[in-house]
Amino acid sequence: MVISRKDNEPHPIDVYVGGRMRLRRIQLGLSQGALASKIGVSFQAVQKYESGDIRISASRLYDVSQRIPGLLLRGLSRRDGGEEPGGRNRARK
């Protein structure tokens, strides 16, 4: 299944990752500014990560996960129907 979207819309995976980041930030009682200081970016970047407006690179995501305890991205590799994000089916026969 290919996810159709407009060019100006954030990718569903970016929205998912940002949402998990926001949820964990709130659970820890951190403001966007406090999180930004911990991970070395501006609070505007945190806002955009959380909304999915900008993508968080794999290396930045790793750095964030080292600084925010419990930031797990469960379900990222497989979604409904056994497909990977982006629509690639993992099941091969």
Image: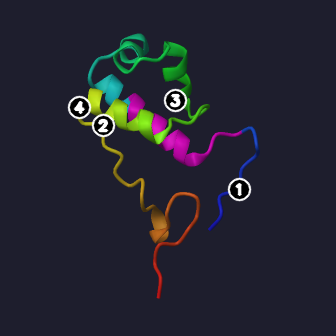
Q: Is residue 62 left or right of residue 79?
A: left
Give the number of the mark in front: 1 or 2. Answer: 2
Residue type, label 1: Ser
User: According to the image, label 2 marks what residue?
Assistant: 71
How far apart marks 2 and 3 lie (CA) works out to 14 Å
37 vs 27, nearest the viewer: 37
Where residue 72 appears, x then y in whole percent?
30, 43
**Which of the two labelled residues, at mark 2 and mark 3, occupies the earlier sequence position?**
3
User: Which segment is the magenta one?
Assistant: 9-22
CB atoms at circles 4 and 2 under 8 Å apart?
yes
Which residue was labeled with disc 3? 49
Compared to residue 6, the image places residue 82 above or below, namely: below
Q: Say which element carries label 4.
A: loop
Q: Residues within 10 Å of mark 2 (few under 14, many from 20)?
A: some
The label nearer to you, 1 versus 3, is: 3
Residue 83 place in picture, x, y as percent: 50, 67
Residue 48's quadrant in the figure?
top right
Q: Name the element at disc 3.
A: helix
Classify mark 3: residues with Cα within 10 Å, few (<14), some (14-19) or many (20+): many
Q: Give the residue at mark 4.
A: 69
Write down the quadrant of residue 35 in the picture: top left
Is residue 16 inside the magenta stretch?
yes
C-alpha gap between disc 3 and disc 4: 18 Å
Type of amino acid at the residue the image marks with label 3:
Tyr
